Amino acid sequence: MGLTYFKRFRMELDLDRPLFAAPTCPPAYQLLPFDERLIRDHAAAKFLSFRQELDVNVFPCLGRRDGCLQLMREIAKRSGFVPEATWLLQYTNPQSGRQESVGTVQGLQYEGWGAIQNLGICPLHRGGGLGTLLLHMAARGFRSVGLARMHLEVTTDNTAALRLYERLGFRRAKVVYKAAEVAMA
């Protein structure tokens, strides 16, 4: 194993300004506010969203079902957890009627900032505005508890996420480096 540093951007958004427009929730989808009984569903959406993504190198727990469940439980127990900024997106398959958890976002409050944790949409459900919808709901949740600013971090190689955040008005505030153990070839 070797130590590698991943370059990330801290992206910030001023919540005192008008929020970006949120798309309407498509008919087969349902937005669910945080409820402790949904922690396993959040973890499932997190795992399906991140298991094959670059961030698994930075945060290995995202590549394991049990790791996602443990992470979700830890986030929900933190003193700065913001349930109002934590949302689950479920999809009902029209053919089978089966519900699947396909998107999640969690919010924390830290030093007067709202901090987005692990915004994720499952690959088959990307490109339809669902990430924008979850970010909008998180931003509204932060506003509802009196926060005027929010931030998130994104790995610089995640160009699709960077484009989304910049399109929604986030600005690059600084570069941070995250150290991670990676297997050496």
Image: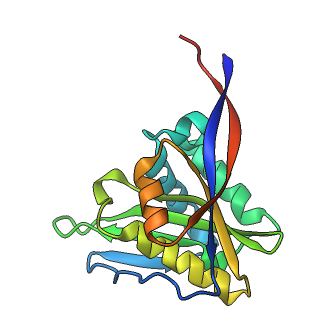
92 or 183, nearer to the observer: 183
Q: What is the x, y in percent for residue 156?
A: 53, 45
Q: Does the rendering let one see residue 91?
A: yes
At x 72%, y 82%, the residue is: 147
Q: Does the rendering let one see residue 64?
A: no
Q: What is the x, y in percent for residue 80?
A: 79, 69
135 or 158, nearer to the observer: 158
36 or 78, nearer to the observer: 78
Q: In which quarter of the image is the N terminus?
A: top right
Mark count = 0
Q: In this view, does 109 lie to the left or right of 131?
A: right
The vertical placement of 47 against 114, above or below, is above
| Occupied quadrant, residue 121 | bottom left
| Occupied quadrant, residue 60 | top right
Q: Which residue lies furthest to the left in this view?
A: 95
At x 55%, y 68%, the residue is: 170
Q: What is the x, y in percent for residue 100?
A: 36, 62
Q: What is the x, y in percent for residue 87?
A: 53, 73
Q: Is residue 65 left or right of residue 81?
A: left
At x 59%, y 18%, the residue is: 183
Q: Is residue 45 left or right of residue 184?
A: left
The vertical placement of 87 against 2, above or below, is below
Colouring mode (rainbow / by chain / secondary structure / one colour): rainbow
